[in-house]
Image: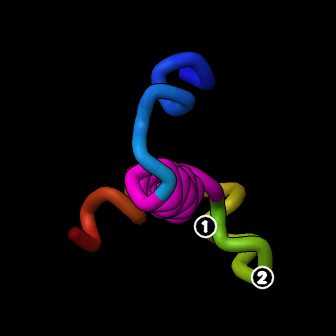
């Protein structure tokens, strides 16, 4: 990935970095349980999060 990014122009490298950051944040938002809601953490938080969409 770093080798591919090194071939990109400076502006494109920044865009790629922002894209990866946004994808990472979205993945965490969709897969991690709500830290303050113990009920979701204990009783199927993943299924509940997916059904909300």
Relative horizontal placement of residue 41, taking residue 53 as reference (left or right): right
- Is any part of residue 28 visible from this angle? yes
Q: Residue at x 77, y 73 (%)?
A: 35
User: Does the magenta-highlighted stretch encompass residue 23?
Assistant: yes
- Mark 1 to mark 2 CA distance (whole Å): 9 Å
Quadrant of the rendering where the C terminus is positioned: bottom left
Secondary structure beneath dot 2 equals loop
- Prevalent SS, magenta region: helix
Circle 2 sits on which residue? 36
Q: Position of residue 8 (x, y in %)?
A: 42, 37
- From the viewer's perspective, is the residue at label 1 or at label 2 nearer? 2
| The residue stretch that appears in magenta | 11-32
- Give the total of numbered labels: 2
In-front residue for pair 46/31? 31
Residue 29 numbered tag: none
Q: Position of residue 6 (x, y in %)?
A: 55, 29
Residue 40 numbered tag: 1
Q: Residue at x 43, y 60 (%)?
A: 11
């Amino acid at each position: 990935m770093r080798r591919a990014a090194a071939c990109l122009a400076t502006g494109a490298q920044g865009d790629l970095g922002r894209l990866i950051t946004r994808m990472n944040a979205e993945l965490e938002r969709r897969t991690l349980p709500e830290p303050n809601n113990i009920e979701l953490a204990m009783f199927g938080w993943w299924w509940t999060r997916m059904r909300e969409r």
